[in-house]
């Protein structure tokens, strides 16, 4: 198992954000703002789904890495830490997934 984890990637993203290096994709993406980063996250999610449906293991690994990276960039722009998300996930484990989902108010126009 790799010693690299999402916390380390989150720290790298924060470091590159502070650098302001114009050669850094991370710094560029962060300075472009939420709309650009969120669109990129959506693109990576779709590419991950395509890789999964295609049962292309190599592409699924690569696209999953892209997805996680762009997700952490979106969290950074939104000032949400990985720890915030993990705390939420931990709280949800106290009940069944069906019970937890039922407890959330449905979003407008979204089917459950």
Image (cartoon, rainbow, N blue to C red):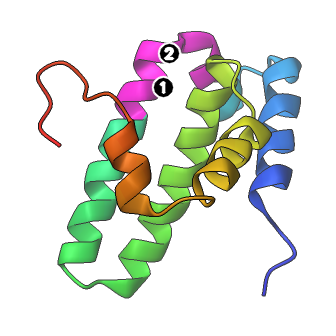
Circle 1 SS class: helix
Q: Is residue 10 left or right of residue 109?
A: right
Which residue is the site of mark 2?
A: 34
Q: Is residue 55 above or below residue 85?
A: below
Q: Quadrant of residue 74?
A: top right
Q: Which residues are magenta?
A: 28-40
Residue 61 part of the magenta-drawn span: no
Question: Which is more toward the observer, 25 or 46?
Answer: 46
Which residue is the site of mark 1?
A: 37
Question: Which is more toward the observer, 20 or 103?
Answer: 103
Circle 2 SS class: helix
Q: Quadrant of the C terminus?
A: top left
Q: Is residue 2 left or right of residue 32?
A: right
Query: Where residue 82 sits in the image (x, y, percent)?
Result: 73, 41
**Residue at (11%, 38%) from the top-left corner?**
111
Q: Is residue 97 above or below residue 81?
A: below
Query: Where residue 15 sits in the image (x, y, percent)?
Result: 88, 32
Q: Are marks 1 and 2 in contact (CB under 8 Å)?
A: yes
């Amino acid at each position: 198992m790799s010693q690299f984890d999402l916390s380390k990637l989150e720290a790298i993203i924060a470091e590159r954000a502070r650098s302001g290096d114009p050669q850094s994709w991370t710094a560029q993406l962060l300075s472009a703002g939420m709309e650009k980063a969120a669109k990129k996250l959506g693109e990576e999610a779709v590419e991950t789904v395509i890789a999964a449906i295609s049962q292309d293991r190599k592409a699924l690994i690569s696209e999953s890495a892209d997805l996680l990276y762009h997700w952490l960039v979106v969290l950074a722009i939104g000032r949400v830490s990985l720890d915030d998300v993990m705390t939420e996930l931990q709280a949800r484990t106290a009940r069944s997934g069906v019970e937890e989902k039922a407890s959330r108010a449905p979003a407008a126009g979204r089917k459950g």
